[in-house]
Amino acid sequence: MSDSALTPTSHAIEDYLKAIYSLEARRGEAVSTNALAERLGVTSGSVSGMLRRLSDLGLVEHERYKGVKLTPEGRRAALRVVRNHRLIELLLVEVLDVPWELVHREAEQLEHALSDELAERIAAKLGHPDVDPHGDPIPDAQLSITEVETRSLGDADPGEQVAFVRVSDADPDMLRYLSQLGITPGDTLTVLERQPFGGPITVRCADAEHHLGMQLAAAMRVAS
């Protein structure tokens, strides 16, 4: 079989491993088939078929009704893709001036083609960064990653001063809106008010006050 015939399959495997890693890291437990199907936008039947294959390859451990976990080999493979993805995002933002709301989609395409050698050259060019433009930690060359404990901005109480460290890159419109407000990871936010019943949260960033909806506040992670 030719390399071109193998490429889509290997890409699918990497996408699954990366999705399992992200869900496992977020929840701290085995990942359900339904959660994985929702994350990838595929059917549960498709997920079940791929999980059998990943299990045969020694990349996951899958127990029926208990979910799936990455094996050590699967975790390393997932972290390699995560490293590529986040380095590409940072390269696009810092070197090519691509808006941060657009880089996720581009990195999704390029992450599979990056060799370890090129990834290390990019990391060196960027000064071996710790985080990507959205505040997500970047695994190092040994595929070690430091996950910092965070909480939702929506859980912060009025009067708190918090460090905004991370935001989901899943919604480009959300990132574009934050850019328009001039709020980026690394900023210090002061919580002024939080309306009840899912109402907006008011924060001060630098000298400006902003009213943020709770959906946005929930996606924004602050240092615990």
Image (tube, rainbow, N blue to C red):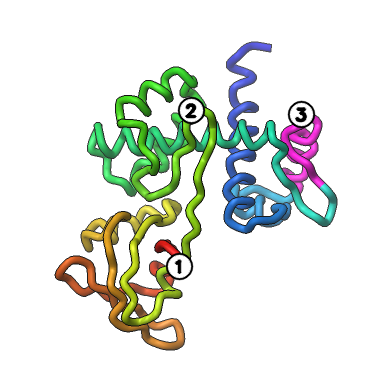
Q: Earlier in the sequence, mark 2 or mark 3?
A: 3
Mark 2 near mark 3, Cβ–Cβ under 8 Å?
no
Residue furthest to the bottom: 196
Of circles 2 and 3, the one toward us is 2
- Foreground of the two, 11 or 58: 58
Distance of label 1 from label 3 (alpha carbons): 37 Å
- Foreground of the two, 13 or 84: 84
Q: Residues within 10 Å of mark 1 (few under 14, many from 20)?
A: some
Q: Position of residue 167 (x, y in %)?
A: 40, 56
Mark identifier at residue 57: 3
Q: Which residues are drawn in magenta?
A: 45-62
Q: What residue does disc 2 label?
A: 141
Q: Is residue 220 magenta?
A: no
Q: Earlier in the sequence, mark 2 or mark 1?
A: 2
Q: Position of residue 172 (x, y in %)?
A: 37, 53
Question: Is the N terminus in the top left, top right, bottom left or bottom right quadrant?
Answer: top right
Type of amino acid at the residue the image marks with label 3: Leu
Q: What residue does disc 1 label?
A: 152
**Residue found 66% across the figure and 51% down from its top:** 37
Of circles 1 and 3, the one toward us is 1
Q: Secondary structure at mark 3?
A: loop
Distance of label 2 from label 1 (alpha carbons): 29 Å
